[in-house]
Image (tube, grey):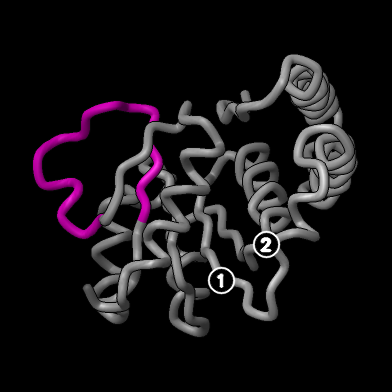
Amino acid sequence: MLTFAVRGCDASLASFRICSRIFTKLKRFFTQEFVLTRISSLCMKFIRDGLFGDFLEETMTNYSPSILYVDDQSDQRIFLAALLEYRGFRVRTAKCALDALELAGTERFDVVVLDYELPDMTGALLAQEIRAFEPSARVILFSGRAHLPPGELTYVDVHIVKASLLDNIIETIQGLLELPAGR
């Protein structure tokens, strides 16, 4: 189930909800990730036409901040990645911690967004591993829980509950990007 929300007028929010329902229903029939990507692209076209207007053209620059987004739930991973790309970010995704470590070892990312519940380790442990070789990494931890056990946020800059508004997620990413590296 897609758990991200977007602020907007009633008509735009209705379009978003319709796209979310279409995406959710169709993903049952198509489990291969490339098909889900095509469905997500189609939904993004609908959202772009009614929800964000000319946002992309107004905010384009030569530099696109890079984001590594790690989530084992393919529908959320594909959907949020598509929305972030539309908002001007360059996004790489991984479905498990091992894939994320491989990407983080070969590429530099401005922000790392981690799901807390990963199949091979927690997002908190993955944050620690990433910080071991990239101490200045800006790390966001997504979780379905509002509160995590003590010590789980030691290597994390920001903890966001997955049901947060998309606008809040974007603002958080932009806020982290404004901080000097290695704060």
Residue segment shown in magenta: 140-156
Residue 39 image offset from top left, x and y in percent: 86, 40
Instruction: Give the vertical position of 112 relative to 81 (above or below).
Output: below
Q: Secondary structure at mark 1?
A: loop
Name the kind of residue labelled 1 in the image.
Pro
Q: Which residue is mark 2?
A: 88
Q: Secondary structure at mark 2?
A: loop
Residue 58 image offset from top left, x and y in percent: 75, 59
- The image quadrant where one finds the N terminus is top right
Residue at 63% from the left image edge and 45% from the top image edge: 80
Residue 72 image offset from top left, x and y in percent: 54, 45
Work out whether residue 57 or residue 95 is closer to the camera in this orientation and state it.
Answer: 57
Say whether residue 85 is magenta.
Answer: no
Q: Is residue 130 left or right of residue 104?
A: left
Q: Which mark is residue 123?
A: none
Work out whether residue 155 or residue 120 is closer to the camera in this orientation and state it.
Answer: 155
Q: Which mark is residue 65?
A: 1
Instruction: Give the vertical position of 17 relative to 112 (above or below).
Output: above
Q: How dense is the environment of label 2, judged by Cα within 10 Å: few (below 14), some, or many (20 and up)?
A: some
Marks 2/1 in contact by CB < 8 Å: the verdict is: yes
Residue at 21% from the left image edge and 59% from the top image edge: 155
